Structure formats: structure tokens, C-alpha cells
Image (cartoon, rainbow, N blue to C red):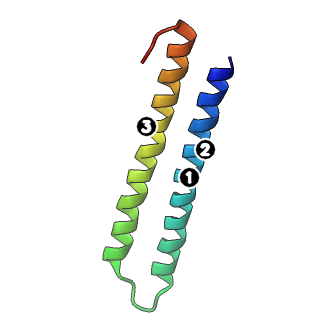
Amino acid sequence: MENQLIILSESLDKKLEVLQKIQDYNKRQEEIFSAENVDMSLFDDAVEEKQRLIDEVVRLDAVSYTHLRAHETGRNL
């Protein structure tokens, strides 16, 4: 049980880091749109990076689930 809690805790820490980066990109997008001359290429870059980060959160969820299931069933990864 302790191993499972460690896995969950580590996964949540990683997700929090990624979510903080997503928030930073949200702020960046607001700054881009607040500018007098909006540079859509900068906005598009931020959107692409946010998508990459969202994909990372999804991947972290899958890895966490797989690790937990492996511990429950006694399998090694």
C-alpha cells in the first residue's frame, strides 16, 4: 500500500508541475492578446506548447494507472 501511495504522490507532483506550466502559457497568451499589435505566431506557438503539456498530463495519468495496476496484481514493469 505504501508503494502505491508513493506512486500516486510522485505522479501528482509531476502533474502539478505540468499544470503550472500550462497556467504560465495561459498568462503568456493573455499578454500576447493584450499587446497593441497581436502576433498570432506567438499565440499559435503557445497553443502548440499547451497542447504538448496537456498530452503530457494524459500520459502521466496512463503511466500512474499502469503502475498502480502492476502493483495490485504483483507484476513488475
Q: Nearer the viewer, residue 75 or 34?
A: 75
Give neighbour class at mark 3: few <14, some 14-19, many 20+ (Cα, 10 Å).
few
Give neighbour class at mark 1: few <14, some 14-19, many 20+ (Cα, 10 Å).
few
Q: Which residue is mark 3?
A: 59
How far apart are the two marked residues, 1 and 2, measured between alpha carbons?
6 Å
Which circle's residue, 3 or 1, is located before the other in the chain?
Answer: 1
Q: Which residue is mark 1?
A: 17
Q: Is residue 74 above or below residue 13?
A: above
The residue at the point 38 percent across, 60 percent down is 49
Amino acid type, residue under disc 2 in the picture: Asp
Name of the residue lying farthest toward the top? 73
Q: Tell me residue 33's x, y (percent).
A: 47, 80
Q: Is residue 20 above or below residue 60?
A: below
Q: Tell me residue 14's x, y (percent).
A: 55, 44
Amino acid type, residue under disc 3 in the picture: Arg
The residue at the point 41 percent across, 45 percent down is 55
Q: Nearer the viewer, residue 64 or 2?
A: 2
